[in-house]
Image: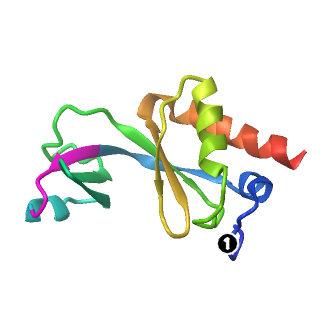
Amino acid sequence: MQTGFVRELQAMLSGMEPALDADPYVFVHASVGDPAALAVEGLFATIVEDEGLTVIARFDPEADHGAGPHFARITLQVHSALEGVGLTAAVATGLAAEGIACNVVAAFHHDHLFVPWDRREDALAVLKQISREVKN
């Protein structure tokens, strides 16, 4: 894994080292200000929108997450700069070419991709191929 922030597209792609989390995740809608939303076991992220709060958390079979789909989280290990240009577009284009949906959450150090649970291995293979192609 690289140290420092990477801005150049080729370096971001060649160094992304995608890592697949073993657990499934769910996206849940809650009301803004709902204290239970922040007490979710396995909380990964919360996003406030005009329509309410989106909670992304590890799937807990004991919790009532509704009937929403499960997603796999793939973390791009490269420390991509928030000002970096093209990483999301390149990744999304590669996954779209294979018909794989992708929801990206960019954080301070890493980009996290949420792909359909049943396509997780396919998505990981696509990302590794993109990285290999840039290295060659």
Percent coordinates x, y for residue 111 in the rendering: 54, 57
Q: Nearer the viewer, residue 114 or 49?
A: 49
Q: Is residue 59 magenta?
A: no
Left-right relation of 38 to 124: left
Q: Which residue is mark 1?
A: 5
Q: Amino acid at mark 1?
A: Phe
Q: Position of residue 79 (x, y in %)?
A: 63, 67
**Magenta segment range?**
27-33
Residue appearing at x 55%, y 62% in the figure = 110
Q: Residue at x 18, y 42 (%)?
A: 65
Quadrant of residue 27 within the rendered picture: top left
Q: Nearer the viewer, residue 131 or 62?
A: 131
Q: Residue at x 10, y 61 (%)?
A: 36
- The residue furthest right is 136
> How many numbered markers are drawn?
1
Residue 126 occupies quadrant: top right
Q: Quadrant of the N terminus?
A: bottom right
Q: Is residue 100 left or right of residue 15?
A: left
Q: Is residue 102 above or below residue 17?
A: above
Residue at 74% x, 58% y is: 15
